[in-house]
Amino acid sequence: MDYTEIDEFLNHREKRVLYQEQLLRNISGGVTLATVRVNYPGIKKSNYITDRIAKIVCEDIYLFHNKNIICKEIYKNKEGVIGHFIFNTDNIEVKKQLIYMEENHILGRCVDIDVYYLDDSDPLMPSLRGVSRSDIGLEPRKCFLCEEEARICSRSQKHSIERIKEYFISKYEEYTCYVDKRDRLSYEISQLALKSMITEVSTMPSYGLVSPVTKGSHKDMDYYTFLESSFAIAP
């Protein structure tokens, strides 16, 4: 193996760790830091599937928790795609929420979401501390292939790279199928709603409601503005 490549990987990891502490120190109002990395072995962590998985999880973290996120950064280095999120909420609560995502999101087991805070027990030199699963009374994380402790499988290299690749590909395919189904169902529901609105406004007599021949009791809408608004809210 090329040792210069290993050195570069370790250098990028060290820079990322230092940068995490800088973020938490420098962002005003920041209480907790969450960092997303792909849960993939070796130093060649970046490929189309792993990058997409990390980006999707980062997007969903922001989607579900944006009201408590005051800063986010997503970039790529030798560790693959990295996501940093600064929260204005307690580290234990953030850890619980992100463990839920790790365990319930289709792609959750494909990433590591680490949570940190500044330990100010030494006020002259606060240091970055991680929040572990044991801090909230949970057992160590399980391997996504055999349900053994993940760290044991990782250290012993119990599973082949090919088997791990297959898992990542299968989870990504499962996720894309889920998104296709979700979007298709959403579209079908929206079309039913649109049909219902058009049917309603086309009904006569309608006694106080907008119809093709009257505004009913409405002063700010007629048949045509009703149609325009109906189509405007349809995807």
Image (cartoon, rainbow, N blue to C red):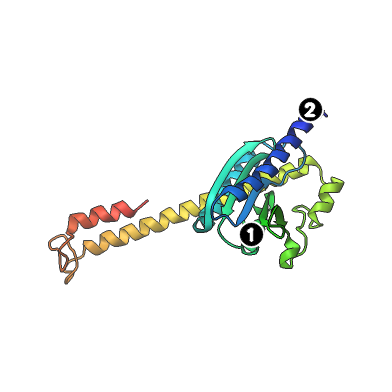
| Location of residue 217 (image quadrant) | bottom left
Residue beneath disc 2: 4
Q: Residue furthest right?
A: 156
Kindly report which numbered mark, 2 or 1, lies closer to the viewer in this rendering.
Answer: 2
Q: Is residue 152 left or right of residue 126?
A: right
Above/below status of 150 relative to 42: below
188 or 96, which is in the foreground? 96
Q: Residue furthest bottom?
A: 207
| Location of residue 77 (image quadrant) | top right
- Residue found 38% across the figure and 56% down from its top: 190
Residue 185 has which mark?
none
- Residue found 71% across the figure and 55% down from its top: 129
The picture places residue 212, in percent across and down from the top left corner, at 16, 60
* Label 1 crowd (10 A; few <14 / some 14-19 / many >=20): few
| Element marked by disc 2 | helix
The picture places residue 138, in percent across and down from the top left corner, at 74, 65
Q: Is residue 33 left or right of residue 212?
A: right
Tell me which amino acid carries mark 1. Asn
| Element marked by disc 1 | helix
6 or 175, which is in the foreground? 6
Residue beneath disc 1: 104
Q: Residue furthest left?
A: 213
The picture places residue 216, in percent across and down from the top left corner, at 15, 67
* Label 2 crowd (10 A; few <14 / some 14-19 / many >=20): few
Q: Is residue 235 left or right of residue 198?
A: right
